[in-house]
Amino acid sequence: QVQLVPSGGGLVQAGGSLRLSCAASGSIFSINTMGWYRQAPGKQRELVSTITNGGSTNVADSVKSRCTITRNNAKNTVYLQMNSLKPEDTAVYYCNADIWVAGGAHRGYWGQGTQVTVSS
């Protein structure tokens, strides 16, 4: 059984910062790409940023200058540092990880969402 447990969401004023974390646990053999997605009310889920196990990153244009994704492979944890937050960043943020589990199965896993609310 694999779980992704996020933390770090909350309410922040525009211009503020938040750091999201997501820790993967369970019968994990290895983790490939980890990332963050978000879904605002009435909108589709969209990519925020991903990072490979080698450290290569992909960041959405909408957050490129304001967000940094990192990971700690020893802790199976991915982080998203968000600065200069805007009201339009308000959404439920979901972590995702591409995981090989013990026994050879391989698929993507989602964490439960964490709410980020940016007030103007």
Image (spheres, grey):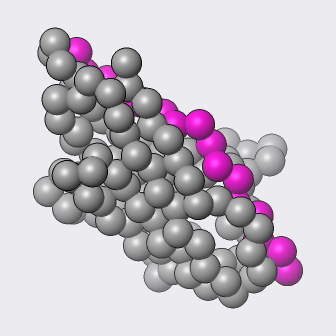
Tell me if residue 50 comes above or below residue 70 in the rendering. Answer: above
Find residue 30 and report its horizontal and vertical position in percent: 17, 35
In the image, residue 72 sits, relative to residue 2, either above or below, namely: below
Q: Quadrant of residue 87?
A: bottom right
- What quarter of the picture does the C terminus occupy? bottom right
Spot occupied by residue 69 in the image (x, y as percentages of width and height): 38, 66
Q: Position of residue 16 (x, y in %)?
A: 67, 83
User: Which quadrant is the N terminus positioned in?
Assistant: top left
Residue 106: x and y, percent?
A: 25, 21
Residue 68 visible in this rendered orientation of the protein:
yes
Of 103 and 64, nearer the camera is 103
Residue at 64% across, 49% down: 114
What residue is shown at x 32% (from left), y 65% (from top)? 70
Left or right: residue 116 compared with residue 110: right
Quadrant for residue 2, please give it. Answer: top left
- Which span is picked out in magenta? 105-120
